[in-house]
Amino acid sequence: MTIVLDLFSLQVVGWSMKISPKADLVIDALLMALWRRKREGRVLIHSDQGVQYACFDWRKFGSDNNPELSISRRGNCHDNAVAESFFSLLKTERIKRKIFKTRSEASSEIFNYIEFFYNPTRRHGNNDGMSQV
């Protein structure tokens, strides 16, 4: 799973789940984010150094869409702290100790968490206790 977070609002604006971490995983999440935001102009995209960000398809997507790319430094966990915090919350608040019978069931649970709880309802300490919407 990968997410695209708006660092200003902390809202998950794009996300994707796939069986393996290939370029289409991150491209699908980014396309969702771009579609939702209808952002014109150059967009800053920060990522870790995962294999999906080094492959040909991702580089081609970057050259076709001209984003400003920022990549985490090797061994620096703080660069991706906001995304890691989201995944910690997802695990703690929704999927910990649950056993899903199918991949579809897990995907549905994560969709519900993001779209019906995390984005519109969940309050955040660094946002004066307000939800992202």
Image: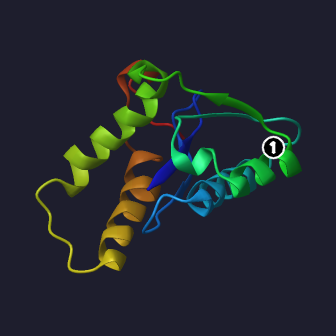
Is 81 placed left or right of 90 in the picture?
Answer: right
Q: Position of residue 68 (x, y in %)?
A: 77, 32
Location of residue 28 by image quarter:
bottom right
Vertical side of 20 occupied by 48: above or below: above
- Residue 130 visible in image: no
Vertical side of 130 occupied by 126: above or below: above
Residue at position x 59%, y 54% in the image: 26
Residue at position x 40%, y 47% in the image: 118
Residue at position x 43%, y 54% in the image: 114
Query: Residue 54 versus residue 3: which sits nearer the camera?
Result: 54
Farthest residue to the left: give it.
97
Q: Which residue is mark 1?
A: 39
Query: Residue 122 versus residue 35: which sits nearer the camera?
Result: 35
- Residue 90 visible in image: yes
Question: Dot 1 lies on which element?
Answer: loop
Q: Position of residue 110 (x, y in %)?
A: 36, 61
Image quadrant containing the C terminus:
top right
